Amino acid sequence: MSDDTRTRTPISLDDLLSANKNQFDQLFSRQMDDASLLSPSARPASNATAGPVDLVPRALKLGTNAIIALNRRFDFDWSYDILETKAENGKAIVRIKIDVAGKSKADQGSATLEGNSALAFEKAAEEAALRCADQFTGRAPVDSGQGDQAPLAPAARTGAKSDAVVGPIDIVTLDLIENALRNARHEMDAILFRSAMSPVIREQHDEFPMITDAEGRMIVGQFGSYISEMLKQQDFDLKPGDVILQSDPYKCGGAISHINDWMVLIPIFVGRDLVGFSSMFGHMMDVGGPVPGSMPTAATSIFGEGMRIPPVKIYAEGVLNKAALDILMNNTRTPEMNYSDLMAIVAGCRAGERRVVEICERFGTGTYTQACEALLERTNRAMRKLIVQNLPIEPQSFEDYVDDDGLGNGPFKMKLTVWREGDHAYFDWTGTSAQAPGPINFYLHDGMFKMFIGVYMIMVFDPQILFNDGFYDLIHVNLPKGSLVNPEFPAPLGCRTHALSRQFDVMGGALSKHAPEMATAAGYGSSPHFLFSGVDSHKRPFQLMEILYGGIPGRPVGDGMDGHSWWPLFENIPTEYLENFFPMVIERYGSVADTGGAGKHRGGNGIEKVYRLLEPGDVSIHDDRQESQPWGILGGQPGACSEKWIIRGTAEPEPLPSKIDNVRVEAGDRIVFITAGGGGWGDPLERDPRRVRNDVARKLMTQEKARVAYGVILTGRHYELDLRATTDLREATKLSRKSLELFDFGEGRSGVS
């Protein structure tokens, strides 16, 4: 930790951002060049002005269609050499030699040079290769079916296959393709984390990747089934090199849930066939509006939150839409950071695109398409079993509450009813409160909620299952229009993460009725945000948004984690990063003893983070669970509520509400941010006394809590365990206490109905 006297380096985050932007421009242009998707200034001139040599590609390889056809004819036992490439009389001409079993045949093909010259040479090479094959086999060349046409319209391309596959796909090939896709999805993440500049993406990983099939069904990723919703708002003529950007939840059916999330979509082509999409979205630090960070707690409509981007081609066939980009960057307080993050998301998507093309080139597009279907079907079969094993036949309801909407309204009920019919699951949100005047509304579209169900059930019951869209036909959802989970336009959405995280508690409570021994308690049920902005003493603006974490609930298999994210891939921002790039000192960051609910498996503790601010500025806070406790289950006790305080200079601490904007702070002021703990699982008197002793020794629990909640007696400086006294106290407690109930909501409201 640092103090006020430490030497601060003159370099700022803005300096790094500026250097990063220049580097990104160079790298991205080179990447587009390698993919033959050049900007106008880098492209060859048109036929009217260019010499023939300008149109000839630097390197030419056979396309996927030709390779597939030759593999079939010669059972992979062949090779080829490109003898000549030239542009002549408006034609691309390619001469190829094919070697099969020690014999060689040569021939040439041609294609009209119109539009994309690289595509014309690929078509000419395909024709030449098939003519060579025809000399060996005596068969007519295989017609690609497209001639010299431009790429087909999306409706005609969707689901297209370059080669048919006969019989079921073998398990080895399926596993190879599955793991290649898993790796591609993680490579997308890695590229984004190394390239983005905002702490919320680079350090905290607030982003979500996806690779889909041609129908837009997620094969690997985290958020699925938004492609059709995103594209139906505008009928794009998709072509290689296109990059679509959008950020308006109401323009994509809630695929993203607030306007800070910028979503990028890249269609993946193999030859002229659309085989899928590569997509990511990430949280932008600022997208305009009245409050730095663009998530005002006082917003009463989405128009008061910032800039909404409808689906737009930010790149068209590899050409940057600079006018659109300029408009976007002109409407944010952090243009260079947003630019870096946007280009990093695009680069991550292009990595996914590239890997899918490589898979198709290795196995054939037909095999790849069949593998995608097989992976979806396998997840479907696995989910059918999970539904039958873990969902009740009789409808079971559960409710929990979001404390308030930031405008003095609340609490807001979230009620879910769950049942199954055969191997189909039904989730009904009837009974949930009407949409809020303030920005806690969660615009939840069908596919996203099905995704949440899948995440919950797979992670709780069988984490080995590949998470994809294959099970969506088994899930049926009712989201009442005009409710907190399906608000009507233009309801504000900026603080929707409190309802989003609370829905996991509600879902867990509803599912626990059927198999409570397999359920979890409630977690910290919120998404705590700390925002700090201003201008430092060097006249440089700064803006920080940090997501904090709380207690994870006690579980059937063990304790909840202390100070962990409810979303498993999120991470914290290192203190060194915060203190280097923002005017603050982190005086404390650690677990808060006793905030986790007691249980056989205790709930995780919340965390306390104390920020000492070194420059004047404004602070905004988003949180919840300041009124309602995270409930315990099967005798487990509830976790502690959250708290926020401001200490102005040497004055006494003043409480802050859980949702507030633009709290003016001066140099030397402190913000104390305490998050909620998780509920406990099981009877605390069944917890191994030695584990209780270790929790006390590790400062996760006080000696008093060990005695009162767990009946464990510890003595001396080293917390020696008194087993006889512990046994006596536990026996006396069991005789005097009330019978344990399935849920313990503490002093808050009951969630059972």
Image (cartoon, helix red, strand yellow):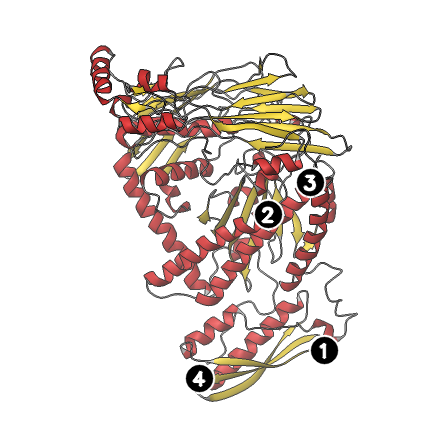
The residues tagged by marks 3 and 2 sit, at their Cα atoms, a distance apart of 20 Å
Picture layout, residue 577 above or below residue 407 = below
Residue 464 on image: x %, y % = 34, 47
Residue 333 on image: x %, y % = 71, 34
N-terminal of the two: label 2 or label 1?
1
Judged by depth in the image, the label closer to the viewer, 2 or 1, is 2
Judged by depth in the image, the label closer to the viewer, 3 or 4, is 3
Q: Which residue is mark 2?
A: 345
Q: Amino acid at mark 1?
A: Asn
Q: Which residue is mark 1?
A: 89
Q: Which residue is mark 4?
A: 137
N-terminal of the two: label 1 or label 3?
3
**Mark 4 neighbour class, 10 Å CA radius: few under 14, some 14 to 19, many 20 or more:** few
* Image mark for residue 13: 3
* Mark 2, secondary structure of its residue: helix
Q: Is residue 344 left or right of residue 219?
A: right
The residues tagged by marks 3 and 4 sit, at their Cα atoms, a distance apart of 65 Å
Judged by depth in the image, the label closer to the viewer, 3 or 2, is 3
